[in-house]
Amino acid sequence: MTPAEQAAAWRALAAEDLSLLARLHGVELDAETLAALKAAEFPGCLTLPPATREGEEARLLMAEVVAGEDAAFAASLDELAADYAAIYLTGRYHASPNESAWLDEDGLERQEPMFAVRAWYQKYNLGAGDWRKRQDDNLSLQLQFIAHLCTQATDDAALRPLADFLDAHPLRWLDRFAERVASRAATPFYAALGMLTADYLHGLRAALVVLADAPWPPPAEEVRPEEEALSNFGCGDAIAFVPGAGPTW
């Protein structure tokens, strides 16, 4: 395999990882999905290694959960469903999976950050489907978009826009989302998933420093909504994304 072929294979594997993570954040778990995760030895199947100590700990916890006894896994489906709803549907944990809640100065949904993400999608003739059901800056949709950029890149240099998107959007808020979910989730699976995902994107961004000649940007002042504002928001290779649950690309 030539270096170019190796690079293309790496981009394809990274896209599969990102699509899998998007699916896990975007759709409630079921027995079939859990069985597929176990068969794939998730998260050991991921292309990138852990980038941080927290990421390594999250992967160890996730590996322990996925490798557990089948009967215990099946018995936890109701608890997993309740945890999924609390994070992604009802806002009970005050840990929105949408960027606006973290970056808008008033902690409001569907604000300027959402429209900025939408503009990125439009550059690539993509759309988020019905934004009233799942807004453009939702974590699952952003992960799908990142996967799309990986698959569309013809060489590593073409990944530079991906680095720009990571810097401008998910890496500005995902750590805070992951930390809050980890501290409030009722299940080890979801406590680990956010931390694992944040770590994966940090690892991907670090790889782009070399692959796409995309140096780290200078530190920028973050907008951190007040805690009171945050309380106001409401509502891979191994696994294919559920049709109709994602964006229009």
Image: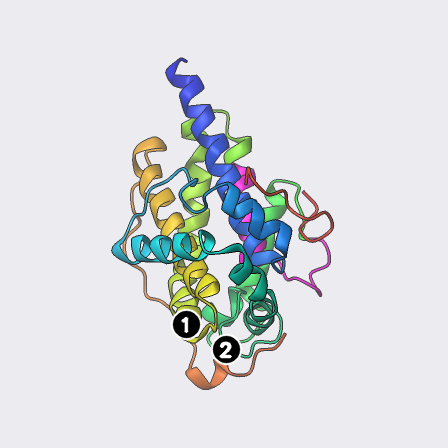
Q: Residues within 10 Å of mark 2 (few under 14, many from 20)?
A: many
The kind of residue tagged 1 is Arg
Q: Which residue is drawn at 31% across and 38% down?
A: 209
| Dots 2, 1 in contact, CB < 8 A | yes
The kind of residue tagged 2 is His
Question: Which quadrant of the figure has residue 123?
Answer: top right
Q: Which residue is drawn at 60% across and 50% down?
A: 33
Name the quarter where the C terminus is drawn: top right
Q: Does the magenta stretch include residue 71?
A: no
Q: Is residue 47 above or below residue 198?
A: above
Q: Which residue is drawn at 48% across and 64% down?
A: 190
Left or right placement of residue 136 versus residue 225 in this view = right
Left or right placement of residue 243 versus residue 177 in this view = right
- State the mark number for residue 180: 1
Q: Nearer the viewer, residue 153 or 28?
A: 28
Magenta segment range? 129-149
- State the mark number for residue 94: 2
Q: Does the magenta stretch include residue 132?
A: yes
